[in-house]
């Protein structure tokens, strides 16, 4: 079965501290993986996807096929990073994007 | 234009009413989606249209009726809803046949309350 698991509902860190939001997935094959973010009072938007292998707003995410993980990392958290983060999976060429339950990140001053 | 626009932002309706949610995009995306999002939950896929044809219906009750009049518009017709249908309804779109075909661009949502 296709599934995305985000084990932490809430993650609270201090400004300047490293942050890692965990994501594990279950899929038989090679899915496309994404992180979407929703800032307060803003719409859900793409943060990054594994194919691009890029860094957005200082965030990176590495796909580990052996551990079926796609954790999101940032070395120095900023207050403006506070938001809800969703890990998502999509079959290649398919339409069914499946979202994890989400992790709310709170960065304290 | 790089946005997905949804109207209305808020809708309150009784269980016997008929109403519609509208979604519009002018990015040339040929896949459009309806998602339902309950409070503190992730979005759940309801319907997918590709090239104006219904591709996926995730076993949604018939009181929700989608329509895709053209490549830029997506409607969701609502009739005889139940209070448990109260939620944020998100429209999204994505390109087809190109890199990034699965990247979703979301609208701000229509918050529906069924009394």
Image (tube, coloured by chain):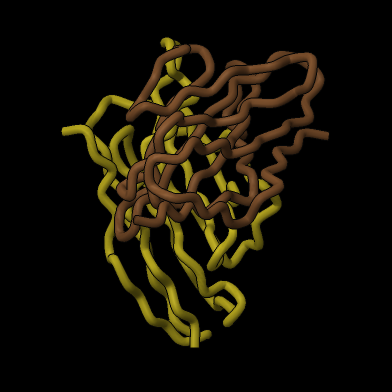
Relative image position of residue B6 (x, y in whole percent): 29, 54
Q: Residue at x 49, y 36 (%)?
A: A18
Indicate whether B97 appears above or below A102: above
Nearest the eye: B30 or B65: B30
Q: Residue at x 50, y 69 (%)?
A: B87
Indicate whether B45 appears above or below B82: above
Residue B73 lies in what quarter of the image?
top left
Q: Residue at x 66, y 35 (%)?
A: A23
Residue A79 located left or right of residue B96: left
Work out which quarter of the rendered image holds the N terminus of chain B and state it. Answer: top left
Chain A image colour? brown
Q: Residue at x 46, y 87 (%)?
A: B14
Relative image position of residue A35 (x, y in whole percent): 50, 33
Nearest the eye: A9 or A99: A9
Residue B91 in view in this figure: no
Relative image position of residue B41 (x, y in whole percent): 59, 59
Nearest the eye: B47 or A96: A96
Indicate whether B105 appears above or below B20: above
Nearest the eye: B106 or B40: B40
Chain B image colour? yellow
Residue B8 in view in this figure: yes
State the count of labels.
Answer: 0
Residue A109 lies in what quarter of the image?
bottom left
């Amino acid at each position: 079965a296709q599934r995305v698991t985000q084990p932490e509902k809430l993650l609270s860190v201090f400004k300047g501290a490293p942050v890692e939001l965990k994501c594990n997935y279950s899929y038989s094959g090679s899915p496309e993986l994404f992180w979407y973010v929703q800032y307060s009072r803003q719409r859900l938007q793409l943060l990054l996807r594994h194919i691009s292998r890029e860094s957005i707003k200082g965030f990176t995410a590495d796909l580990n096929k052996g551990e079926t993980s796609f954790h999101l990392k940032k070395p120095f958290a900023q207050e403006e990073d506070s938001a809800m983060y969703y890990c998502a999976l999509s079959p290649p060429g398919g339409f069914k994007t499946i979202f994890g339950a989400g992790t709310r990140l709170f960065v304290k001053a | 234009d790089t946005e997905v626009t949804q109207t209305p932002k808020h809708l309150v309706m009784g269980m016997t009413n008929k109403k519609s949610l509208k979604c519009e995009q002018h990015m040339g995306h040929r896949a459009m989606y309806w998602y339902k999002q309950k409070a503190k939950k992730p979005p759940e896929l309801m319907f997918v249209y590709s090239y104006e044809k219904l591709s996926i219906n995730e076993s949604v009750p018939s009181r929700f009726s989608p329509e895709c009049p053209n490549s830029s518009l997506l409607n969701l017709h609502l009739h005889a809803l139940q209070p448990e249908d109260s939620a944020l309804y998100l429209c999204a779109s994505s390109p087809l046949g190109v890199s990034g075909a699965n990247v979703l661009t979301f609208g701000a949502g229509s918050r529906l309350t069924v009394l």
